Image: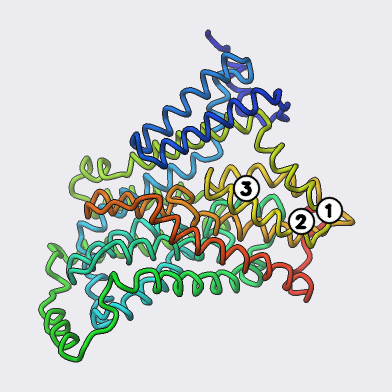
């Protein structure tokens, strides 16, 4: 079937979703869940499973006349910035890595900590939090995964404990500022939350959730790294570190300086993107272009190093969620959860927090945030204050990503890097035991924190427009 150009144009316009019949909702939800089961049991490659699920739902949607084919572009348009960030930072990280900068920084961290596992672990967790707060989660994870792998090869440490710790701590950093996570930008814009309110409200709990994660991770990996080392072992380790040459992989110090400058300017660009009126994807692509222009050697090779598997995986997921959302199923489920509270804030905050966290661990926090934003707008008013609902949604959408291996892009990047670069496979059972436990404690703490902060008057009122 051929679609006229005006239909293509109208496909990107927001129109109210008319709920489909219960049978169609169940059919689409069943296909979505079957896709996630396929990913979980790894019968297929996760990217293949996501693309297959997306193809089936698109065919069903067209056959049942739920939406025209051009609507697929509407499902993806809100997430194009994610792909731009992944592509841009992927190129930037590859070019900067070839300059020897990451090796240089890795050796600096190793020397700072003396290579001791306990100090190195804590330092990497704190650096992750800071990087994500400033860089946002995607570029920070791409950079940190490179750093961790270099460090582990140098010290002969197992990479899984450090890289998984970095991935989980990244989700705490994602709630620190307005721009550190995409759900923050979506919810903060819809709610009219000023930038500084994130530092007052969500940053304190971001720090709390970070130390919850550190404590759990330290216990879980208690036998995976040499946490306690004798004086002789420390001395031998120091002798080994003294042989490390930070400049070993630096072919040209001028290129190293250029790479560092471009990286720093890109970081500043991410921090100022909102004030400059541009997207994170634009900053990432400008940084990538500058790196290729002033510091890059193999342009084709750098572009090939972009994580296209992750991009296709998320593309499939976004199409799946868009199709299911088009049936009205996600909105219906969310409305039922909200209805259970009978508009009582003491019940509404826990239900919203639990639902958004669990849903984010299954279907990614971006579509969950997009689905719940209009519902929060509808239920908040004179009898139900909007402020605690918005902060619950922001915090729990981000921390819910710790629940499963596909719950957040930081976990996807870490697990993919472990498999590709170190040949280490992390199964769902292992991750659920680790990340799921951390998520439960963090979300429970978030609900208590929001209720306490609201009752004590720590949460500032939002402009009337947010209501």
Residue in front for this viewpoint, 77 or 312 = 312
Q: Is residue 104 visible?
A: yes
Q: Residue furthest top?
A: 1
Residue holding disc 1: 343
**How far apart are the alpha carbons under marks 2 and 1?**
6 Å
Front residue of this view, candidates 247 and 313: 313
Spatial CA span between label 1 and label 3: 20 Å
Q: Which residue is mark 3?
A: 369
Q: Which residue sits at x=24%, y=83%?
A: 114
Lower position in the chain sequence, tag 2 or tag 1: 1
User: Is residue 294 something one can see in this rendering?
Assistant: no
Residue underneath mark 2: 348
Q: Earlier in the sequence, mark 1 or mark 3?
A: 1
Residue at x 25%, y 70% (from the top left corner): 106
SS under mark 1: loop
Of the numbered discs 2 and 3, the one sitting upstream in the chain is 2
Residue 205 lies, in percent from the top left, at 60, 71
- Measured as percent of width and height from the top left, residue 51 is found at 42, 30
């Amino acid at each position: 079937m051929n679609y006229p150009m005006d239909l293509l144009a109208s496909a990107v316009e927001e129109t109210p979703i008319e709920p489909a019949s219960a049978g169609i909702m169940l059919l689409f939800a069943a296909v979505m869940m079957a896709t996630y089961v396929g990913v979980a049991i790894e019968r297929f490659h996760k990217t293949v499973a996501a693309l297959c699920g997306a193809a089936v739902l698109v065919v069903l949607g067209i056959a049942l006349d739920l939406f025209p084919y051009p609507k697929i572009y509407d499902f993806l348009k809100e997430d194009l910035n994610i792909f731009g960030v992944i592509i841009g930072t992927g190129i930037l990280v590859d070019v900067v890595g070839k300059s020897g900068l990451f090796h240089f920084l890795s050796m600096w961290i190793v020397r700072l900590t003396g290579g001791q596992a306990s100090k190195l672990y804590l330092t990497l967790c704190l650096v992750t939090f800071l990087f994500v707060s400033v860089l946002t989660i995607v570029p920070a994870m791409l950079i940190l995964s490179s750093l961790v792998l270099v460090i582990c090869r140098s010290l002969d440490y197992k990479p899984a404990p450090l890289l998984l710790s970095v991935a989980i701590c990244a989700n705490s950093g994602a709630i620190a500022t307005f721009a550190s996570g995409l759900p923050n930008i979506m919810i903060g814009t819809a709610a009219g939350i000023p930038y500084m309110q994130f530092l007052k409200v969500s940053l304190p709990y971001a720090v709390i959730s970070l130390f919850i994660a550190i404590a759990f991770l330290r216990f879980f990996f208690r036998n995976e790294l040499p946490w306690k080392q004798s004086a002789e072992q420390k001395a031998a380790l120091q002798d080994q570190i003294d042989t490390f040459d930070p400049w070993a992989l630096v072919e040209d110090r001028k290129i190293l300086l250029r790479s560092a400058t471009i990286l720093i300017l890109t970081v500043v660009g991410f921090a100022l993107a909102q004030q400059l009126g541009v997207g994170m994807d634009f900053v990432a692509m400008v940084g990538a272009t500058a790196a290729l222009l002033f510091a890059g050697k193999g342009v084709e090779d750098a572009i090939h190093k972009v994580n296209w598997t992750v991009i296709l995986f998320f593309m499939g997921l976004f199409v799946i969620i868009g199709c299911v959302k088009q049936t009205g199923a996600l909105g219906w489920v969310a409305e039922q959860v909200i209805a259970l509270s009978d508009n009582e804030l003491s019940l509404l905050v826990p239900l919203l927090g639990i639902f958004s966290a669990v849903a984010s661990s299954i279907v990614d926090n971006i579509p969950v945030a997009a689905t719940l934003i209009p519902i929060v707008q509808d239920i908040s008013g004179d009898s139900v204050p909007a402020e605690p609902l918005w902060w619950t949604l922001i915090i729990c959408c981000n921390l819910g990503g710790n629940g499963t291996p596909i719950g957040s892009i930081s976990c996807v990047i870490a697990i993919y890097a472990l498999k590709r670069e170190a040949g280490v496979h992390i199964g769902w059972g292992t991750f659920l035991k680790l990340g799921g436990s951390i998520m439960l404690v963090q979300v429970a703490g978030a609900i208590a924190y929001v209720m306490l902060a609201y009752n004590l008057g720590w949460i500032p009122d939002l402009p009337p427009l947010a209501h």
